[in-house]
Amino acid sequence: MTYDFNTMNVVLLGMFLAAGVWTVMTSHLLKSAIGLAVTSIMLTLLLFHLKATLAGVFELSVCAGLITVIFISAISLTKPVAETEARKMKMKRLQRFIFLPVLLFIAGWLLSSRMIHLTNPAHTVADAAATVQQALWSGRRFDLVGQILIILAGVFGIVVLFKTKDSVDGDKKQ
Amino acid sequence: MAVLLILVPLAAVLFLNLPLQKIMCRLAFWIGLILCLVQTLLVIQLPAAAWNEPCPVARYLLRFAPAVDNLALVMFLAIAIVVFVSLLVARSTISDCGKLFNFTNLVMLAMAGMNGLVIANDLFSLYVFMEVAAVASFILIAFNREKDAFEGTFKYIVMSAVATAMILSAIGLMMTVTGSMSFNALAKVMHTDGGNPVILLSVALLLGGFFIKCGLIPFHGWVPDAYSSAPSATSVLLAGIVTKTTGVYALIRIVTMMNLYSTPVQTLILVVASLSIVVAAFAALGQSDFKRMLAYSSISQVGYIILGLGVGTELAIAGAVFHLFNHAIFKSLLFVNAATIEKQSGTRNMDTLGGVSDRMPVTGFTSVIAFLSTAGIPPLSGFWSKLVIIVAAWKAGFHWYALIAILASLLTLAYFLSMQRRVFFGKLASGLEDLKEGNPWVIIPACLLAAITIGLGLCIPWLLGSFLLPVRDIL
């Protein structure tokens, strides 16, 4: 049996899309979070297979790892809804997203057919043999300032929205 | 030099978070105000060319050459004024020193993000700094940790996430074709390869994403909730400048720099703009919450700006930019007044208010100035900017759109007259006998913004030649 690079890509892409659809369609919050992690893992495999190793590592560590931990921690703080209400919500969800697989199929067909074909650019980052480090430190230093600002905003978000101080008499103060 | 408008607020935030919390807590507010004043003075003093002179340290560290033009200067000025006003309102409405400290830090981060967006010379940088302002805004809306505010924030986050996904997808698709994200490279590709389906798809995604960020109809779902549920100082910031920078300015920049003008794109922009002008004006008529009414009014006024963008002539773009600046000023003024009334009376429900002008004459007077300007009554600034947009639309042959804009002005007048009658005029409502004028922290910015609104209207001949028509350079 011969190994076909393109077939493998298509199989991984199919699994990635299936996991994504399941994530959106399932009415169970925990299953949805796990579905998202599986989607990220599929994307990671796809990125590894396409030789975008660093992108794969970021996807695996941040999306499949860190974000899933945050989601599951948040879900553990919620209460389950009543069974009848859950059934109603499930029906609503199915009605709302029934067209999603069809849309995905059409989008996939459009992207794979000759109607929309991605051309190979003359000067991509990869073609210029630039590494991720070079791209970040030489080409996109200005954006790193933006990332620092976002991280700082996130820190203040945690301080403002989550930090509470227990005073001596037990009252909670911000 | 323009890079300093990002680095200095960043350095200020880092400095304020050094130890000595008690001192820093008191300093933060004043440092925020000083930064805004310095930015305002520099914009007024220095021409665009001076902003492009390289700052050796920043150039070495960031390897970035900003491209500041007259449009960027207008935005720098609007950002500085609105942030200044927002900080003053925060001083009036936030009594806890620690909370004011956090608020000031977040506002300075948002300011750095908006300044970064304004000087960005490629699509990806623009996206990064747009996210900085957005993230800071999410937190500022939920700042008081109230249920409504969380709901408003959640809607804003969800819609922003959709917009982000669309914009990022567009960036990715464009990257596959051009291999570069600089506006110059993208403009060249638009010229040579504009019919490429991938390019068309990415343009559609970009426009959709920025329509959501602008809060245009039918992508406006998040605007009334976010504006009305946010703390007063955040409402001023959000309605005054954040949406204008992350949505409207970014859209103007992208459409003009990437030269997206084609008949379908122009038609799409004009239709969405007209829809926003009319539908939001009707929606504003039916509101009883002061801030929700102002939110719908914002959507309608943003429609006028986008209409100017859609027309696309030099005069129309100048009008759009002028209305963008005017709107930042008079909408901030209206939100400052809403904050004052809410603080003094304890309600935003216009049906329970009445005769407020008797007890709050300054708030009443400045509110009249702002509403007359919004409705386009001469000689206030809003009249001139709307006039320029409508004349430009007429001259460019978009007669129907010009007519819609004129008729919608009557709707604007109607909902603002209704607001004035219900809130400020008539007999004093029961329960408001002890009502007093707001404190200087809100009265000073209200007077300042009203003075700018009147001043801009009276100085239009000078402004048009020296500040606005040079904006044509961006075309």
Image: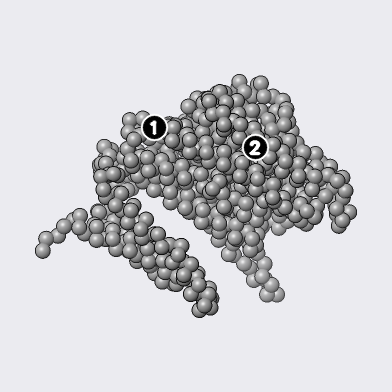
Residue with the mark numbered 1: B187
Measuring from the top left, give residue B120's x and y in whole percent: 47, 38
**Is A43 positioned to the left or the right of B145 in the image?**
left
Give the residue type at disc 2.
Answer: Ala
Q: Secondary structure at mark 1?
A: helix
Mark 1 or mark 2: name the one nearer the start of the chain. Answer: 1
Measuring from the top left, give residue B388's x and y in whole percent: 61, 27
- Badge 2 density bin: few <14, some 14–19, many ≥20, Cα 10 Å: many
Query: Which residue is painted at 42% across and 69% down in the image?
Result: A26
Identify which residue, B131 or A105, lies in the foreground.
A105
> Are discs 1 and 2 located on one and the same chain?
yes
Residue with the mark numbered 2: B408
Identify which residue, B349 or B337, lies in the foreground.
B349
Can residue B18 be seen here? The reply is no
Identify which residue, A72 or A106, lies in the foreground.
A106
Query: Which residue is painted at 28% across and 60% down in the image?
Result: A14
Q: Nearer the viewer, mark 1 or mark 2?
A: 2
As drawn, the residue found furthest toward the left would be A1
Figure check: A85 above or below B81: below
Query: Which residue is painted at 55% across and 39% down in the image?
Result: B273
Q: Secondary structure at mark 2?
A: helix
As drawn, the residue found furthest toward the bottom would be A83
Figure check: B148 above or below B400: below
Can residue B186 be seen here? The reply is yes
